[in-house]
Image: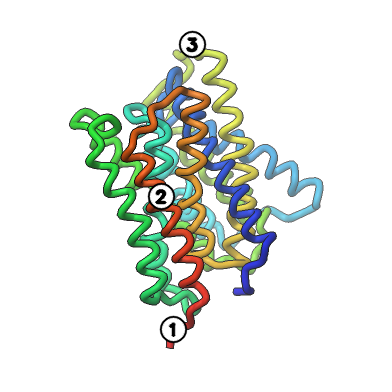
Amino acid sequence: MRESKSLDYFLLTLLALIWASAFFNIKIATYSYEPLTIAFLRTFFGAIPVLLLCYIKKIKIEAFSKDWYWFATIGIVNLVIPFFLIAYGVQKVQSNLAAILMASTPLTAAALAHFFTKNEKINLVKSSGVLIGFSGIVFLFSDDILINKNNIFSAFLILFGSCFYVIGGLLTLKISDKKNENVTASILIWGTIVLLPISLFFEQPWNLNPRLDSTLSLIYLGIFPTGVAWLLRFYILKHNGLVFQAQVAYLIPIFGVVLGFFILNEAITSKVIISLIAVIAGIYIVKKGSKVKVV
């Protein structure tokens, strides 16, 4: 992996902002749509701009090539499962809480990257950073305003969903020699194929009478946090590595809390502020730890 530059951190911040905007849009989408339908339409609308880009750039899409099983597997692990779990969980929690819970990703990424990659070994400084950041997540579970007995299961589902993003990132490294647009388009195609029959069977979306704001949020979810953001994600993953890319989860809660407050008037408690401070401290320490060589 090449050394991260200013442009890389800018792209990481942009990715975080786009993904953070997904959470309040998911919340709005749940006003009218069920979780499987949200996951399906996210992948469907997300595939459209990516497929158009591949057509314009004349990039061959290999979704049904000899490597189809990689694309199908990544599509299920990286799209189908987390999209469903997060949409299901957001029904009962604030969108800003969902964004903060996603900050558990770097801890999982650092641990798995140590065992499954050659050049992203964990060290004391880096592990201290992710643990400090993760402590902010753990602290939130003591906030009765955000998490209680009625939604704690939903909170854990969101945490569980975040783990699949990391696993999907590891799987993507297996096909890192392929073009970014091709990989993104191929996994979106497979995600759509898998989710279509499941959503039709379990949720019968043709019976819905959706609100306009829910529909607009769902279209936005597909085009930006899914299509555009996934192109950015795979670019960063291929050029900077899994652990660097996973640090986006530290920035997501910061933007998620701000957007949730201004868009949905969601509560910001003192414990949320303390948690965000811990997350920001974790970002700084992880960044320093990435420069320390493991011998």
Judge depth for marks 3 and 1 and give the one in front. Answer: 1
Q: Where is residue 87 drawn, in percent x and y? A: 41, 33
| Badge 3 vs badge 1, beta-carbon distance below 8 Å | no
Q: In this view, does 110 lie above or below 212?
A: below
Q: Answer with the quarter of the image where residue 282 lies.
A: bottom left
Residue at position x 39%, y 64% in the image:
129
Q: Most extreme residue toward the left, as rendered?
A: 149
Which amino acid type corresponds to the residue marked 3 in the rendered image?
Asn
User: Looking at the rendered structure, which numbered label has been put on residue 265?
Assistant: none
Q: Note whether residue 115 is visible.
A: no
Q: Where is residue 78 drawn, in percent x and y? A: 47, 50
Residue 94 lies left or right of residue 226; in this view the side is left
Give the residue number, with chain letter if any, for mark 1. Answer: 294
Q: How far apart are marks 3 and 1 (CA)?
A: 57 Å
Image quadrant where one finds the C terminus: bottom left
Which amino acid type corresponds to the residue marked 1 in the rendered image?
Val
Q: Where is residue 88 drawn, in percent x and y? A: 36, 32
Residue at position x 80%, y 52% in the image:
58
Judge depth for marks 3 and 2 and give the one in front. Answer: 2
Q: Answer with the quarter of the image where residue 47 lies.
A: top right
